[in-house]
Image (spheres, rainbow, N blue to C red):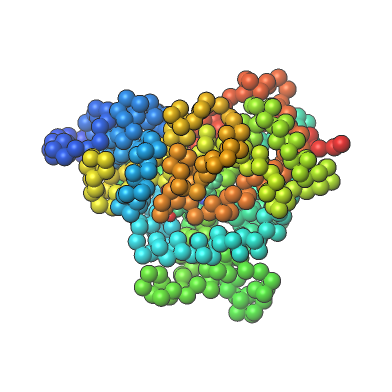
């Protein structure tokens, strides 16, 4: 232990001296070429101390001073922050390919590697093959239509869980937890056709536990990302712990994969279902852009990524939507009136086909994504080569963060930007989130934008609408809507700092 500490201190000292010498040289050479402007940086740590607990807010404040394209140094990691729709347009329209790389953080690295990972793949033939799989197999309309029953079942289960939990003494439930369970169960069903939350499934519970741990670890700030010498020490143990939980989750998922392969050999079950696991096992590549077949390891990575990409984003959006509605009771009333007039009385159930008539519900989801994008910087991009953007030099391997949180609150674009006003999305020709309107890009834009928009845009209104149709909602005793704590906390996604507690009262006439 003592030796480790001594090694860490010595290593740090040597690195600090080396970094100061090389940094001076590096800075002079970079100054010759014009980087975007930015705040003064400290030796070694750069601008790390300006990050704060809510970096999207800190960066927005800095951008007001230094401009909508700004350079920051997170330790030795050079970062360009994009904070306006005009700069985002320039980035995605004219530099999309060169800026379509990914900055890989420590928690994402490990023996499990990046083979099969779409999120962390650099822009390459391998990425193109995985992306094609997503758009033509997973999130294509025909498959989504065929899986409507799976979504409906998972939502019904959530409504039942909420009804049961609401019968407790206080009746107040942690709303986000129920959305998380629904999202997790839904993805489990889309992939494995299995209810991972079935109380009888020990393997399901263990998978849920380890996947949850990985997401928790991925959301923690890690000093090793900013100071390269610390990577070797992994001082917070984030890489080691992530690796441990990923391996356990892979073992469980590996068991599901093996069982499926055996049942396929027996010719059982397949005619009844075609889930994502069937798609992955049936995959045949050309051996050039992708392998001839996926290994079980690669399938594991793809599967695991669906859980990490899909659960926290969905939960964050739905929890914020509920929080904003309880914070704005008139909006909540208006939405419930719409739901109950379109869907009908308490014995009726919200269906996907009702969505066409539920314009206000869809506007509520859009307004939530404007004010509370779950990924306020998108997923960090990286310059794959140096380029010139708006007259500034962007060196190769620079991290690019697009502050979509700030872009969605820009008073030049949005009237009363801090108000929760779904009505703005009811206006004719209003912007949408498909990546063409750079004032509003909660799913990103260009080549790396979220491939799951077709799934998310079905699940989000269905989940929120079902809970609002089935229950009336009140705040716990003593909490007034205007006193609700609406502050934010940054983890893997942008969550409510204080989890939302509310009481569901079954809808009766
Ligand atoms: C509220 C729901 C969601 C939001 C707001 C959201 C948002 C995003 C954003 C901002 C990105 C990064 C775009 C960029 O870097 O330019 C992304 C990427 C991605 N999302 Fe989503 N997402 C959501 C739901 C989902 C779901 C349900 C899944 C899968 C089940 C999913 C799978 C992915 C994947 C695989 C990527 C990586 C794409 C790539 O790197 O090429 N997302 N998402």
Say which residue appears at 31% left-offset and 39% top-offset. 80
Q: Is residue 502 above or below residue 120?
A: above
Indicate the quadrant where residue 400 lies: top left
Horizontal side of 220 relative to 78 (left or right) equals: right
Residue at 72% x, 44% y: name it: 466
Q: Quadrant of residue 2?
A: top left
In the image, residue 138 lies at what x, y percent?
55, 62
Q: Position of residue 174 (x, y in %)?
A: 66, 35
Relative depth, front residue between 157 and 57 = 57
Q: Nearer the viewer, residue 30 or 8?
A: 30
Q: Residue furthest front?
A: 428
Q: Determine whether 283 is above or below 242 in the image.
A: below
Q: Quadrant of the C terminus?
A: top right
- The residue drawn where x is 73% and y is 29% is 474
Q: Residue 66: x percent and y percent? A: 30, 28
Picture layout, residue 150 above or below residue 431: below
Residue 253: x and y in percent read 55, 61
Q: Is residue 203 visible?
A: no
Toward the bottom, the furthest residue is 266
**266 or 28: nearer the viewer:** 28
Query: Can you say which quadrant of the picture contains the N terminus?
Result: top left
Tell how many labels.
0
């Amino acid at each position: 232990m003592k030796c480790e500490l001594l090694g860490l201190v010595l290593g740090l000292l040597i690195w600090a001296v080396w970094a100061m010498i090389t940094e001076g040289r590096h800075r002079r050479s970079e100054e010759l070429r014009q980087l975007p402007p930015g705040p003064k940086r400290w030796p070694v740590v750069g601008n790390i101390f300006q990050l704060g607990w809510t970096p999207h807010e800190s960066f927005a404040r800095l951008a007001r001073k230094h401009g909508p394209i700004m350079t920051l140094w997170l330790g030795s990691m050079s970062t360009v922050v994009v904070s306006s729709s005009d700069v985002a347009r320039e980035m995605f329209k004219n530099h999309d390919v060169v800026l379509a790389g990914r900055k890989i953080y420590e928690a994402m690295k490990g023996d499990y590697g990046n083979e099969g990972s779409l999120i962390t793949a650099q822009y390459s033939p391998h990425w193109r093959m995985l992306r094609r799989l997503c758009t033509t197999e997973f999130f294509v309309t025909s498959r989504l239509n065929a899986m409507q029953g799976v979504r409906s079942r998972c939502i019904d289960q959530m409504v039942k869980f909420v009804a049961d939990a609401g019968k407790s003494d206080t009746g107040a439930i942690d709303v986000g937890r129920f959305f998380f369970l629904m999202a997790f169960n839904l993805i489990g069903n889309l992939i494995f056709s299995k209810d991972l939350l079935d109380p009888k499934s020990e393997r399901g519970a263990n998978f849920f536990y380890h996947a949850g741990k990985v997401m928790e670890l991925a959301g923690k700030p890690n000093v090793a990302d900013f100071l390269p010498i610390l990577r070797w020490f992994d001082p917070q143990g984030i890489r080691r712990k992530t690796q441990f939980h990923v391996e356990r989750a892979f073992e469980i998922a590996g068991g599901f994969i093996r069982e499926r392969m055996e049942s396929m050999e027996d010719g059982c079950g397949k005619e009844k279902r075609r889930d994502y696991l069937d798609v992955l096992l049936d995959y045949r590549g050309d051996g050039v852009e992708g392998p001839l077949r996926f290994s079980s390891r690669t399938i594991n990575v793809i599967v695991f990524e669906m859980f990490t990409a899909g659960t926290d984003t969905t939960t964050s959006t739905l929890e914020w939507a509920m929080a904003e509605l309880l914070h704005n009771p008139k909006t909540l009333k208006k939405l419930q009136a719409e739901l109950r007039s379109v869907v009908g009385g308490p014995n009726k159930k919200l269906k996907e086909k009702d969505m066409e008539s539920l314009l206000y519900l869809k506007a509520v989801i859009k307004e939530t994504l404007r004010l509370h994008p779950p990924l306020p910087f998108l997923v960090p991009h990286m310059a794959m080569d140096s380029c010139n953007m708006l007259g500034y030099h962007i060196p190769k391997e620079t991290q690019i963060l697009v502050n979509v949180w700030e872009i969605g609150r820009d008073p030049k674009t949005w009237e009363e930007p801090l108000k929760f006003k779904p009505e703005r999305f009811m206006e004719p020709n209003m912007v949408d989130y498909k990546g063409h309107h750079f004032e509003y890009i909660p799913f990103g834009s260009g080549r790396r934008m979220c491939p799951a928009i077709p799934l998310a845009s079905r699940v989000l209104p269905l989940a929120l609408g079902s809970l609002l149709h089935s229950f009336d909602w009140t705040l716990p005793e003593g909490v007034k809507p205007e006193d609700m704590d609406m502050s934010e906390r940054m983890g893997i996604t942008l969550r409510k700092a204080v989890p939302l507690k509310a009481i569901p009262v079954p809808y009766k006439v």
